[in-house]
Amino acid sequence: EVQLVGSGGGLVQPGGSLRLSCAASGFTFSTYSMTWVRQAPGKGLDWVSYISSSSSTIYYADSVKGRFTISRDNAKSSLYLQMNSLRDEDTAVYYCARDPSLVPPPRGFDYWGRGTLVTVSS
Amino acid sequence: SYDLTQPPSVSVSPGQTASITCTGDKLGDKYACWYQQKPGQSPVLVIYQDTKRPSGIPERFSGSNSGNTATLTISGTQAMDEADYYCQAWDSRTAVFGTGTKVTVL
């Protein structure tokens, strides 16, 4: 069974940092691209970042570019999101999700983790 | 930036057909997918590559995409289909989600 378990969320002051983790199991993590998607309280889905299976390709939303860094450790079947210079508007539930698109065309994000809540507040 | 627009809400009677639209510039030239999200739960992929259903998704869910509009259709809507639905597409190096539609089964 595919499982994605996010962790690392919490309360942080504006300007602070936080590192999210996503532990994967039930599939060969090293062969899949991964993505982070967030959802502010009561709001819609907001894509954050994408990383290919080998980490050779990385994309970011403009809203987080230069502040967030996505990475992965295939040996540990883990995905990470380092978040720096956090702002109030970064407050959201952060989901990790699997991207099964080995080659184009894209196939959507087929498995999602439970999400971890990040609250940025003084 | 690329925007995908959905109606905020759609109401449907049990057993009837619900159609949810997603509009974006030349969306038909891209591949659209759809997610269902119930309160307090993570999103679930229900349609990918415009028309394909992942394993385990009921046949009553179908999709289309042409011109500027992608459409998710739920035929024979059931009470369990009440949820928020989001379209999504890639624009260059950015994944874009639609604004979301709340489907209410009356």
Image: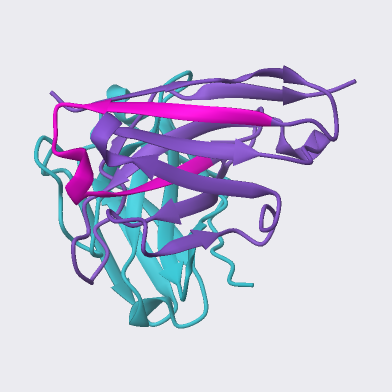
Chain colours: A purple, B cyan
Q: Pick the residue in front: B57 or B62.
A: B57
Q: Quadrant of the N terminus of chain A?
A: top left
Quadrant where the C terminus of chain A sits is top right
Quadrant in the picture for residue A104: bottom left
Q: Residue at x 27, y 64 (%)?
A: A106
Picture coordinates of residue B43, whole percent (x, y): 38, 34
- Number of numbered discs on residues: 0
- Residue A27 colored in magenta in the image: yes
Q: Is residue B62 left or right of residue B70?
A: left
Question: Residue A17, how many percent across, how many down?
Answer: 72, 31
Q: Residue B92, how many percent across, how many down?
A: 46, 76
Depth check: B73 or B68 in front?
Answer: B68
**Residue nearest the observer in this picture, A73 or B7:** A73
- Where on the picture, by quarter, is residue A4? top left
Task: Using the rendered image of the protein, determine whether residue B106 is visible from the camera's viewpoint.
Answer: no
Q: Write the start and end of the magenta stretch as one range.
A: A18-37
